[in-house]
Amino acid sequence: MIFTQEHEALRRTIHQFVDHEINPHVEEWEKAGRFPIHEIFRKAGNLGLLGISKPEKFGGMGLDYSYSIVAAEEFGTIHCGGIPMSIGVQTDMCTPALARFGSDELRDEFLRPAISGEQVGCIGVSEVGAGSDVAGLKTTARKDGDDYVINGSKMWITNSPSADFICLLANTSDDKPHINKSLIMVPMNTPGISLSSHLDKLGMRSSETAQVFSTTCACRSATASAMKARGS
């Protein structure tokens, strides 16, 4: 891999952002067990750092993934693990499937504000009984008229206490476990969504983490449209 002048310009931008906006406050944020995620994400979004490889149509830079690798390397200079993990959840966990498979309506509603930093996202996959064993997850989402009715819980969900939306993996049929799942975009203020208290972790302290519960959570299908999971 040969880095170009454009790669190095991006590297300098992130380096300055980390040095000025994040590292001077890391010790304080680690002690507090959280950081001002909306403020930091808005600043990162203003610099284009949350949509480097995302479509230009929705506010991204439209660059190839080598630029995202440069970003990951530079965010790795943050003096803790929690903040780069929170950023990575936003850029590389809760938005890639949305960017690739989501409808334009979904991408306008969720991807655009995630790229700008106006909204914080989280990814809902892991569960208490299955960990990250996707085939074993129990959360269900059943169509009921114009709604998806979601029941289940997700564990160890980074960013969830401050998140505006969750990209949630659920069983949407009774088919085989590797082909019966969909990712569903759910606003976190939807009735039926609740959270545990913030988990007091031994490490990664500045990233907020909680358990997310969906109890007969009814989402209008126009907003929470399912993106069918690609099974192998």
Image (cartoon, helix red, strand yellow):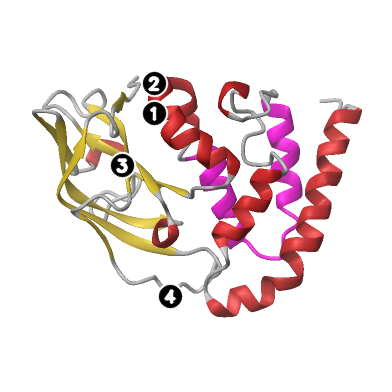
Quarter of the view holding residue 50: top right
Determine whether label 3 and label 2 are within 8 Å by CB. no
Label 1 secondary element: helix
Q: Is residue 51 above or below residue 180?
A: below
Does label 1 or label 3 sit earlier along the sequence?
1
Determine whether label 1 and label 2 are within 8 Å by CB. yes
Label 3 secondary element: strand
State which region is magenta: 65-93
Magenta residues: mostly which secondary structure? helix
Q: What residue is shown with label 3?
A: 186
Q: CA distance from mark 1 to mark 3?
A: 10 Å
Q: Is residue 106 above or below residue 161?
A: above
Quarter of the view holding residue 54: top right
Which residue type does callout 1 highlight?
Leu
Residue 71 place in picture, x, y as percent: 72, 41
Q: What residue is shown with label 4?
A: 200
Residue toward you, 127 or 103: 103
Q: CA distance from mark 4 to mark 2?
A: 37 Å
Residue 83 place in picture, x, y as percent: 61, 59
Decide if residue 154 is on the left or right side of residue 45.
Answer: left
